[in-house]
Image (tube, rainbow, N blue to C red):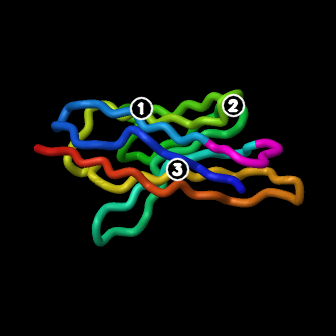
Amino acid sequence: QVQLVESGGGLVQAGGSLRLSCAASGNIVSIGDMGWYRQAPGEQRELVGSITSGGSTNYADSVRGRFTIARDNAKRTVYLQMNSLNPEDTAVYYCNAQIRLVLGYKEYWGQGTQVTVSP
């Protein structure tokens, strides 16, 4: 069974930094695109950024220049480095991955980790 396990969320003051990690485990053949999404209370889930297996990245306008996505394919882990955080970044952050199983690709989500930025 495949799992995505996130870690690294928490409470930080505005201007601070946090680093999220998401590790995939299970009967995995390979991993395609990986990404981070977030959902604030009363809002829809939105894409924060994504990274291909080759390392190409894409970011939402609201985080570009402040957040950085990276991945370690050997560790099956994707990271989200968040700098210059502001209260508008407060949300539950979810990792997402397109994982190739024996029978084909399937999309998986992590359980979510809370990020709270105080003024």
Per the model, the C-alpha gap separating discs 2 and 3 is 15 Å
Residue for badge 3:
95
Q: Which residues are magenta?
A: 24-30
Per the model, the C-alpha gap separating discs 3 and 1 is 13 Å
**Which residue is nearer to you in this view: 115 or 27?**
27
Q: Residue at horizontal 71%, vertical 37%?
A: 53
Q: Is residue 26 magenta?
A: yes
Which of label 1 and label 2 is nearer to you? 2
Mark 2: give few (<14), some (14-19) or many (20+) Cα within 10 Å.
some
Mark 1: give few (<14), some (14-19) or many (20+) Cα within 10 Å.
some
Q: Quadrant of the C terminus?
A: top left
Image coordinates of residue 76 in percent, x first then y, are: 66, 36
The label number, if any, that marks residue 73 in the structure image: 2
Residue for badge 1:
81
Q: Earlier in the sequence, mark 1 or mark 2?
A: 2
Mark 3: give few (<14), some (14-19) or many (20+) Cα within 10 Å.
many
Q: Is residue 42 magenta?
A: no
Image coordinates of residue 25 in percent, x first then y, are: 67, 44
Say if mark 2 contacts mark 3, CB within 8 Å: no
What residue type is disc 2 on? Asn
Q: Earlier in the sequence, mark 2 or mark 3?
A: 2
